[in-house]
Amino acid sequence: MNITKKFLAVSALSAGILLSPFHAHDAQAKVWWNGMELVQGQIGKLTIVKDTELYKLQGEKKVYVKTLKAGGTYRIYTFKPGMLGLGGGYYVDRDARRVKYETPSKAKLNQVKIEQLFRGVKLGMPTSQVKKLETAKFLQREKADGTDTWVYSTSLFGYSTLLVYGFENEKLAFYGYSFDAGQKLGKDQLTAIYNHLKQQLITLFGKQYEQSDSDQGYPPRLAFHKNGLVIALSYDADGLTITITGEQ
């Protein structure tokens, strides 16, 4: 599928958007919690109270790796019964005498998701500034119908996606995410992802949104509004996307 053609439809919707001036560096703002930067996928913080063993799971078997020293702090990304996961298949026993486990508030977790979604960029930002800020893996660049489109590989809300920036006259006109650019997922899978993304957006932006029904048997297009932006969730014959444009 041609990514540029898919997102040019979004560019048409965004014609006449208000290009807000960019501000020096609220970009990629960090979210701090308990003296630690809260990152995507993190669910908690581990503080070692007494020296404790770090294990690597091989199936259900715990294999000793090393001893974590008292006073160390680590991010927690998952858990199993009686165990806390540090990522990469590494775990410690969830023993309150030896480790202290804390979890951030939902507000803090939502703040991380908002930073992840908006990426710190601004509509109207020049290409050079977006290039400087964006740290995802660059894949390709396409030009069509007056739009310069840059495509990156990233993830959003737990899903691998393509991140697409659309520039007009070297200014950012829109950006968004494609969740099935390769058209490898079935309709049932995409519908399940759509429903999960819908709940994520409702959690972040509330239950007030515009809905445009589809006449092709697909779920409706949803449009949420935030600080002069329109965050649209669409699922149609061309795939599943979240796009971010300006208010018309």
Image (spheres, rainbow, N blue to C red):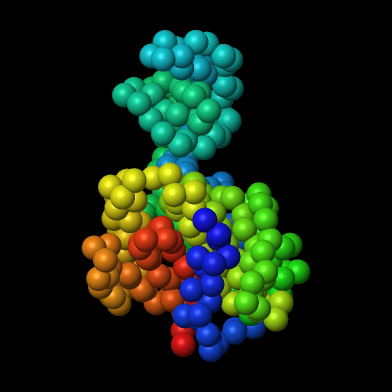
Q: In front: 184, or 65?
A: 184
- Residue at position x 61%, y 70% in the image: 166
With respect to residue 103, does 28 lie above or below?
below
Q: Position of residue 116 (x, y in %)?
A: 52, 57
With respect to residue 140, does 246 lie above or below?
below
Q: Is residue 206 visible?
A: no
- Residue at position x 50%, y 23% in the image: 90
Total number of numbered labels? 0
Q: Position of residue 205 (x, y in %)?
A: 36, 69
- Residue at position x 59%, y 22% in the image: 69
With respect to residue 220, does 192 lie above or below?
above
Q: Position of residue 80 (x, y in %)?
A: 35, 26
* Left or right: 155 in relation to 139: left
* Left or right: 235 in relation to 207: right
With respect to residue 45, does 170 lie above or below?
below
Q: Position of residue 159 (x, y in %)?
A: 45, 47
Q: Classify residue 72 by image quadrant.
A: top right
- Residue at position x 47%, y 44% in the image: 41
Q: Is residue 168 visible?
A: yes
Q: In front: 63, or 37?
A: 63
* Left or right: 151 in relation to 177: right
